[in-house]
Amino acid sequence: MSGGSQDNAALDAIRWFAINPLNNTVLAQGILTDSNNSFYYGSIAVSTTGAIVIDFAESGASQHISTYLATGTFNGTSVAMGTPTLLRAGTGIYVQQNLAPGAAARWGDYSTVQVDPNNPSEF
């Protein structure tokens, strides 16, 4: 689990699960959240050694859209997640140009993190 309030329903959060693929049981689960900012567009990768990386966007009333990651470890039965770390701070307000009338601005619909196929201990 990561820093921040676990019960702030007004903000978006990243929920993750570790699932046993043999019997579909949940081995571990958690929420990455913050009491002042929303977390969204998360993706996760796990190496063969149990290293975990979750990357996501974070923004709020006093923070421009920024990129974060959280790292952790999976030992086969439980997960230990660290506190999110800022990768790159947002530098301004996002404004999408040339929107059709009434269309919603879109930002960052996708994110991805993956294990390096040439080095399984790297992401």
Image: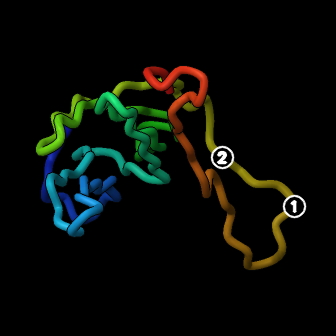
* 56 vs 59, nearest the viewer: 56
Residue closer to the observer: 18 or 100:
18
Residue 30: mark in rendering: none
- Identify whether 91 is placed above or below 61: above
Front residue of 19/92: it is 19
Query: Does dot 1 land on a helix, a strand or a loop?
Result: loop
Would you say residue 3 is visible in this rendering? no
Q: Residue at x 23, y 68 (%)?
A: 24
Q: Relative to residue 86, is residue 24 drawn left or right?
A: left
> Observer-nearest residue: 86 or 19?
19
Q: Position of residue 37 (x, y in %)?
A: 34, 46
Q: Which mark is residue 94?
A: 2
Q: Dot 2: few (<14), some (14–19), or many (≥20) neighbours within 10 Å?
A: few
User: Is residue 11 in view from this perspective?
Assistant: yes
Q: Give the side of residue 57 with respect to residue 38, left or right.
A: right
The tag on residue 98 is: 1
Residue 78 lies in quadrant: top left
The residue located at (34%, 34%) in the rendering is: 52
Q: Residue at position x 60%, y 23% from top? A: 118
